[in-house]
Image (cartoon, helix red, strand yellow):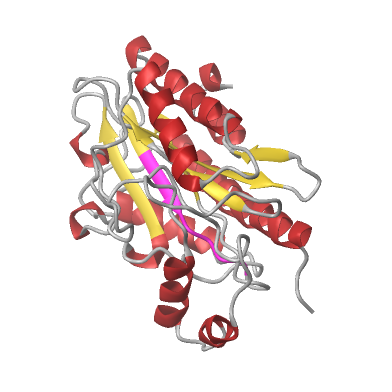
Amino acid sequence: MKPSISDNLETCKETRLIAAQSLAKVLKNALGSSEEISEADFSEQWLKELQKNKNVFLSGWYTPPPNGMGVLFANESDFDRVHFKSLRNKKFWPKKNVFLDRKKGYLNFYFSPVAQKNYIIGDFGLTVYLGSKDQIKNHLKHSFKVIKEIFNGAKSGTKLKDFYQYSQKIFSKNKVVNNWWVSVSDPTGINTGHSIPGTFEDWTHKEMRNLKSNNWGIVTRTISQKRIFINSQEETKIKPGAAITIEPRLRKTPFLPIAFFHTIAIFGDNGKKELLTNFDEIFKISKMNYML
């Protein structure tokens, strides 16, 4: 039986929540320990935690990086590690020789879970700051506010290219930029997010065959190619039952790091919209109460 609009959106919410809750658990353990932990260690622990949940596949769809996961550790003295042009670049895969700084750490996390029952994705990611510099805290607060402001302008019936242009105006008004990174899959190279595949239009028979092929490479390519990007050219309109990611990576000045808050906007068939963040527990664990 074909899943309903509300089924797909509910699956997206549940799938994203699994990624958020598993990260919260692993991060809490890491911050509560005194043992050295590398990006690769953390990535392995997070993946193990995720794999305990039978509602999602064992790996994420966004590959490379390995397992569809991004774990990047920097600190407030050197942000280069989190300034990734693309997580697909091997340089930014989790490393064994880059370690968590519990006092001044500036961390980026991302995972791309896929629901077992209908292949709906629930991508999740954010920046975590463990330091105390007010300038950085204010930048993170401001960047999160910008994303909420963009979401406020998302409406059913809006063309994705018009929503993209609206987001550009919001960036400009708030003196932040999103145009320094690259999307390998988007023909325009730059966007503020993409559709959640399977919510704008149903999977075709060929796509369903691919998804059920038991070949993870084919599955990930099918999901990736189904995405519709929020870019300067896309004519597709947002509609009830659709879900889009809103995931700009924002910089204010060359002296401040990027702020990464990956969110999902869902548009119910009743006309209501909702912004999925799932950040609060992680903010509390990281003593980022200023973000709440």
Tell me if residue 37 can be seen. no
Give the image location of residue 46, x and y in percent: 47, 55
Tell whether position 246 is magenta.
no
Q: Against 11, is 145 above or below?
A: above
Residue 59 is left or right of residue 91, and the answer is right
Residue at horizontal 54 percent and vertical 86 percent from the top: 206
Give the image location of residue 99, x and y in percent: 27, 43
Q: Quadrant of the C terminus?
A: top right
Q: Nearer the viewer, residue 273 or 276?
A: 273
Give the image location of residue 262, x and y in percent: 47, 42
Range drawn in magenta: 108-115
Give the image location of residue 169, x and y in percent: 40, 25
Q: Quadrant of the N terminus?
A: bottom right
Residue at horizontal 50 percent and vertical 43 percent from the top: 29
Residue 14 is left or right of residue 150, and the answer is right
Q: Against 213, is 156 above or below?
A: above
Q: Nearer the viewer, residue 106 or 219?
A: 219
